[in-house]
Amino acid sequence: MKIKKDLPSIFEEFGEQRKKSFLEIKKYKEQNIPVIGMYCAYFPAELAFAIGAIPVGLCSFYEETIPAAERVMPRTVCPLVKSSYGFAVEDKCPFFYFADVIVGETTCDGKKKMYELMAEFK
């Protein structure tokens, strides 16, 4: 797996807060601190802290990335799942982009399918 420490090529297109988030998490990566992306609040952050990692919640609450997800996923899949996948596939979430590992629960078939698709690039 290639560890990402550079900004994505579309960085300049982002709004100010998203740019700040990318730069903040990039600092941790430059210090070789692992980043654990979480889709679920049930993952105990203490586990991440115990191994010296930074736990971060992953992006999933905006409609802007749903069209990208619908190129691969059925339109009938939950908007939360499509938004999450869209952020991941478009490199628009700083926390997913820099995450070394993703932790997520499989509480629905949509999330299970999303994780299978993400395994191809994360």
Image (spheres, grey):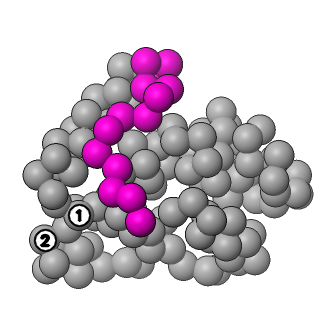
The mark tally for this picture is 2
Q: Quadrant of residue 16?
A: top left
Badge 1 local density, few (<14 within 10 Å), some, or many (20+)?
Answer: many
Report the span colored magenta. Answer: 1-14
Tell which residue pokes out farthest to the front in this image. Answer: 2
- Residue 12 magenta: yes
Residue that mark 1 sits on:
34
Would residue 28 be found to the left or right of residue 107 on screen?
left
Q: Quadrant of the N terminus?
A: bottom left
CB within 8 Å, label 1 to label 2: yes
- Residue 111 seen by the camera: no
Give how far across and how far down residue 42 sits, in percent.
Answer: 41, 78
Give how far across and how far down residue 76 sits, in percent.
Answer: 88, 57
Amino acid type at circle 2 is Gly
For marks 1 and 2 on the same chain, the one whose residue lies earlier in the sequence: 1
Q: Main secondary structure of the magenta part?
A: loop
* Residue drawn at point x = 32 percent, y = 38 percent: 6
Q: Tag on residue 52?
A: 2
- Residue 17 sits above or below residue 86 on the image: above
The residue lying toward the viewer, choosing from 69 and 9, is 9
* Residue drawn at point x = 21 percent, y = 51 percent: 29
Secondary structure under the numbered disc 1 in the rendered image: loop
* Residue drawn at point x = 76 percent, y = 59 percent: 78
Would residue 26 be found to the left or right of residue 118 on screen?
left
* Residue drawn at point x = 30 percent, y = 79 percent: 44
Give how far across and how far down residue 121 sits, in percent.
Answer: 57, 60
Badge 2 local density, few (<14 within 10 Å), some, or many (20+)?
Answer: few
Give how far across and how far down residue 117 sits, in percent.
Answer: 68, 65
Q: Quadrant of residue 119?
A: bottom right
Amino acid type at circle 1 is Pro
- Residue 107 sits above or below residue 55 on the image: below
